Image (cartoon, grey):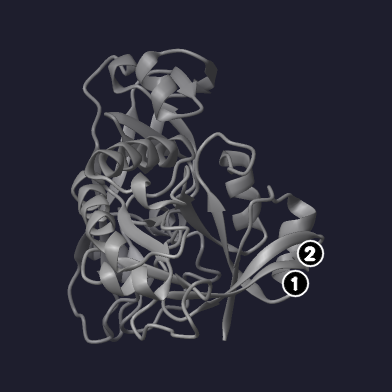
Amino acid sequence: MVKGFDCATKLNKVSAKALKALGFEYAARYLGSSWKSFDKAEAATIQAAGLKLISIHQKSANYSAYFTEVQGISDAKEAMKNAAAVDQPKGTAIYFAVDFSSQAKDVKNIVKYFKAVKKTLSGYKLGVYGSYNTITAVKGIADYYWQTYAWSGGKVADFIHMHQFKNDVLAGGIKIDHNDVKKTPGHWAEEKVVSAPKTAVKAETTKVSTYDVVKTVNAYANAADAKAKKNKKATVAKGIYYVFNEANGMVNVTNKKGVPGSWINPAENKKSATKSATVKYHVVKKNETVTSIAKKEKTTVAAIKKLNSSIKNINLIYPGDKIRIR
């Protein structure tokens, strides 16, 4: 069983490492600005401990009348704003809760609510948390499903991604809820590395999202501050950066691919900035050497070595290996 947990307590280095040591792989925490929500620093702490982070949006959601189309639109907009504020990667899930024992009479409103959330939510995937009745009622609307044992009468849906099966357990020095993670739940994904096909025989290109900062610009903590050009935290020097995230026309740039950096306002980038660059790779063929590849690609051995510094010994290459050329 893949172990996950959710909690209202803010995690620090000690508790995050302790929970990881207990065998937990996933941590579900709340978006927003309340006493139980996480910020960018906590997100970094959770990921540094080796835990996979899952986002939850919940303001109330514990009574039937809460679930209306208008509330669904409002919650989706607020969730997107809060997700952008902590640099949550696009394409990951935000779970919205139905935190009460829903009955047949409640289903119609709950479905309307989640259809409104789904229609409004942009850039993120929709996750639903609730009882067996709730989960089965909204099947087909959401992207991810998280069922709680509470109010479920012992039933467990066969299509869910997570199952919460125990509440208020002391672990790692804090109170948590236990979850059985059955499928990939839409967590803050790590960078994926795809190996080149061994049968490839020609060079190929891959689009990498980068941003050219043409002059030192202001750095901000979140997209909202960058858009308003207020609360500057530092500066971003001239150079080419990876793009970690985008929101409201603002760009989060970073020196380390897949790691949150700083938000900048493109309007403060004086010249026309290039938003994408092309990276060229060469797939090694039989009897090729770094020297022969450099000659063929009209570059130098030194340049190839610099671009492939992560390879322990660039001189040891084999057919099918994929190396960066420029």
Q: Cα distance, mark 2 to mark 1?
A: 9 Å
Which residue, given by chain and number where applicable, does mark 2 sit on?
172
Q: Amino acid at mark 1?
A: Ala
Give the class, few, some or many, for how many residues have Cα within 10 Å of label 2's Cα (few <14, many ≥20): some
Q: Is residue 276 visible?
A: yes
Identify which residue is drawn at 37% across, 83% down. 157
Residues at marks 2 and 1 touching, judged by CB atoms closer than 8 Å = yes
Residue at the spot of label 1: 21
Question: Of residues 255 and 118, which is closer to you in this image?
Answer: 118
Out of 321 and 236, give the one closest to the viewer: 236
Q: Is residue 298 visible?
A: no
In this picture, residue 83 sits left or right of residue 288? right
Rendered residue at 44%/20% (across/down): 225
Q: Which label number is shown at residue 181? A: none
Q: 70 or 79: nearer the eye?
A: 70
* 170 versus 44 height, above or below: below
Q: Nearer the viewer, mark 2 or mark 1?
A: 2
Residue 21, x across and y down, in percent: 75, 72
Residue 325 percent location from the top left of the image: 31, 58
Q: Position of residue 84 (x, y in %)?
A: 40, 38
Taking 186 as reference, is 118 left or right? left
